[in-house]
């Protein structure tokens, strides 16, 4: 997202995505995987939508664009991660990929904040 102005609404979305990933990652690390985990299901749906070019939502499109800029997993891998979360998986590979996603989102959030402040 370098080189462009950031609207406060976009910054809010980036922050919300980062917080969602952080919450789900924390739950998975603590072993709190439940079939009704609202946050996990929300993240699962978002990641699956990123990998689905036919029915991609505006939120998923924004996330996909940010992650492409940040060098994160491919849309196909994000879709797989969504399916893993949906099934209740908490494999080490998934945790590593979620940590990478969280780091990328945090970098994007900090960069967007700096651009909003004119730095």
Image (cartoon, rainbow, N blue to C red):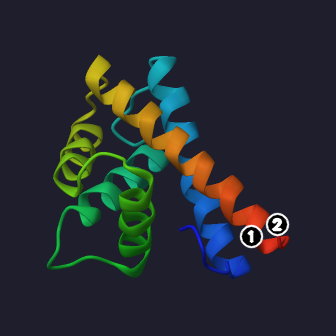
In front here: 41 or 117? 117
| Residue found at x 60% / y 74% | 3
Q: Is residue 91 in sight in this rendering?
A: no
Mark 1 falls on what kind of element? helix
Horizontal side of 25 relative to 112 (left or right) equals left
Question: Disc 1 designates what residue?
Answer: 115
Which residue corresponds to mark 2?
A: 119
Give residue 108's position: percent from left, percent from top: 59, 56
Task: Count numbered badges in the picture.
Answer: 2
Query: Would you place residue 113 above or below residue 88 in this image?
Result: below
> Is disc 2 placed on a helix, strand or loop?
loop
Q: Determine which quarter of the picture holds residue 49.
A: bottom left
**Along the horizontal axis of the image, is 113 left or right of 3?**
right
Which residue is nearer to you in this view: 49 or 100?
100
From this view, report whether residue 16 is shown above or below residue 5. above
- Marks 1 and 2, how far apart at CA: 5 Å
Q: Residues within 10 Å of mark 1 (few under 14, many from 20)?
A: some
Residue 8 location (% of width, % of height)? 73, 78
Residue 64 picture location, percent across and down: 35, 65
The correct choice, above or below, for 10 with respect to 40 in the image is below
Q: Nearer the viewer, residue 22 or 119?
A: 119
Residue at horizontal 57 percent and vertical 38 percent from the top:
23
Q: Residues within 10 Å of mark 2 (few under 14, many from 20)?
A: few
Q: Quadrant of residue 52?
A: bottom left
Asked if the residue under mark 2 is in contact with the one under mark 1, i.e. CB atoms within 8 Å, the reply is yes
């Amino acid at each position: 997202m370098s080189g462009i102005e950031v609207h406060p609404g976009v910054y809010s979305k980036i922050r919300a995505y980062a917080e969602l990933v952080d919450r789900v990652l924390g739950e998975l690390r603590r072993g709190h995987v439940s079939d009704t985990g609202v946050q996990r299901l929300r993240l699962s749906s978002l990641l699956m939508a990123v990998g689905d070019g036919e029915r991609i939502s505006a939120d998923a499109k924004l996330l996909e664009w940010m992650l492409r800029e940040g060098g994160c997993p491919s849309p196909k891998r994000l879709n797989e991660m969504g399916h893993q979360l949906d099934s209740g998986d908490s494999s080490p590979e998934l945790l590593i990929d979620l940590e990478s996603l969280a780091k990328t989102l945090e970098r994007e959030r900090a960069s967007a904040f700096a651009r909003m402040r004119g730095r």
